[in-house]
Amino acid sequence: MQFMIMTYGEAATEPFDRRLAGSGELVDKRVLADPVNTRRFGPGDPAAEESVAACWVVDCDSFDRATEIATRLLASPVPGHADVRPVQ
């Protein structure tokens, strides 16, 4: 099963990325450009919302395993929080 892990805040996670790639669970990782380059539109206050900093696609056995990976990610020097969602 594939899951996307999205982090908010900093995205400097090279040691974590190497370990995840070594486990064979990393499918892809993307770091987004600085939020100043964002074009946000739609209802709501754009200044009040957080910005995704990076996302990983992982291939693992379960939602619990994807959550464990995200928990390890946040134990590295990544401030903020993460979302974990299944990929369809």
Image (spheres, rainbow, N blue to C red):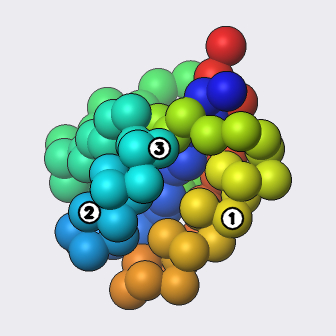
- The residue beneath circle 1 is 68
Tell me if residue 49 comes above or below residue 43 in the rendering. below
Q: Give the mark nearest the N terminus, 1 or 2.
A: 2
The image shows residue 87 at horizontal and vertical percentages of 63, 23
Front-most of residues 41 and 13: 13
Local crowd size for mark 3, using a 10 Å CA cut-off: few (<14), some (14–19), many (≥20): some
Element at label 3? loop
Using the numbered discs, state the Cα–Cα distance from disc 1 to disc 3 in whole angstroms: 12 Å
The image shows residue 30 at horizontal and vertical percentages of 28, 41
Residue 55 visible in the shown view: no
Element at label 1? helix
Could you tell me the amino acid type at mark 1?
Glu
Element at label 2? helix
Could you tell me the amino acid type at mark 2?
Arg
* Residue shown at the point (47%, 26%) measured from the top left: 41
* Residue shown at the point (78%, 44%) measured from the top left: 63
Using the numbered discs, state the Cα–Cα distance from disc 1 to disc 2 in whole angstroms: 16 Å
- The residue beneath circle 2 is 18
Q: Is residue 59 left or right of residue 21?
A: right
